[in-house]
Amino acid sequence: MINVEAVYWLIGALFIAWASLIARDENHPHRWGASSFWGLLGLCFFYGTWVQAGTAPAWILGIAVLVLVAIAATGRLKHGPARTSTPAERVAYAAKFGNRLFIPALAIPVVTVILVLAAPVLTIGKTAILDPKNTTLVALAIGAIVAAVLAVVLLKPKNKLNPIIESRRLLESIGWAALLPQMLSTLGILFTKAGVGTAVGTLAQTVMPRGSLVAGVIVYCVGMFLFTILMGNGFAAFPIMTAAIGWPVLVQEFHGTPAIVFAIGMLAGFCGTLCTPMAANFNLVPSALLEMKNKYGVITAQIGTAIPLLAVNTALMYFLAFH
């Protein structure tokens, strides 16, 4: 069976491969710091297997995270490696291959969906080939591998390792922000465990007009919006605001339909995603990859949509969930 640990090991191997490329780049001004950062991160993916199994102490991973933070804080990741192709070569590729250039990118979702749908019948004897608990993640990893192979087959680069070399360039262009989604997700779990949702609920209910449905809906939606801006992740904000307002006030007190309340609440949170640099994978990574002069240009373009959309979501929750 292909389980999720195999995916983590593949990711770890990629990070170590990128670290090796950086260490061999004599033109890199911070090659030892950068290679140490990405190499240590790769080793964490391997070590995490034994932590998850309970056969290795987790505190070592904690120390590794602190070391990663120290390396990033000293600016040892600031360098974008040379491109694997020139602008003229990329124009020539576009003219030669046309829309076929999109085949590798489209292969990722297509392969993923096919494998997820076919997973129940993909068995050897009675054993599932794909991890039943993490089918989507395993399928996504296989889709990425298929896409990389297709890219090499279709484009026929002189160096068959170009996918790894080019991905190293993209990784260094993004820098430490590539890890921000994982860190923010962990932060959301910590906030929930620490009872932040309960504390926020107590505070909100002391200032919120008693018995006011409108106030409850506004506080929940705006709270999802603001917490998502702070945490960069609607999924991290959701348990906090749902424990504070969504469940005790909107569902239990005003008898709102849970599915509608929580679905629209998430949409309100996603409005915050459009407005925050903390959502690096949505807002900072595209700026880096597109080499935009204003690294907050994506956010600037989205705010005009996000604010009206928040108001619309708030109105939809009020009119659909309680009437």
Image (tube, rainbow, N blue to C red):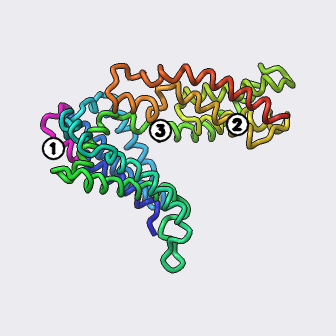
Badge 3 local density, few (<14 within 10 Å), some, or many (20+)?
some
Amino acid identity at mark 2: Thr
Q: Residue at x 50, y 25 (%)?
A: 276
- The local secondary structure at tag 3 comes to helix
Figure quadrant of residue 317 = top right
* Secondary structure predominantly adopted by residues drawn in magenta: loop
The numbered mark, 3 or 1, whose residue comes first in the sequence reads: 1
Instruction: Tell me which amino acid carries mark 1.
Output: Arg
Mark sitting earlier along the chain (1/2): 1
Magenta residue check for 26 = yes
The location of residue 196, given as percent across then percent down, is 65, 33
Dividing the picture into quarters, in which one does residue 47 lie?
bottom left
Q: In whole angstroms, how far apart are the C-alphas of marks 2 and 3?
A: 21 Å
Q: Which range is magenta?
A: 20-29
User: Where 267 sits versus 45, above or below?
Assistant: above
Q: Which residue is mark 3?
A: 181
Disc 1 target residue:
24
How far is mark 1 from mark 2, CA to CA?
49 Å
> Which image quadrant for residue 28?
top left
Q: Residue at x 40, y 53 (%)?
A: 107
Tell me which amino acid carries mark 3.
Answer: Pro
Q: Could one spot residue 54 in this view of the protein?
A: no
- Residue 264 is marked as none
Query: Where 112 falls versus 188 (above or below)?
Result: below
Relative image position of residue 155 (x, y in whole percent): 24, 50
Which quarter of the image is occupied by the C terminus? Answer: top right
The reply to whether residue 252 is in sight is: yes
Say which of 293 and 279 sits in front. 293
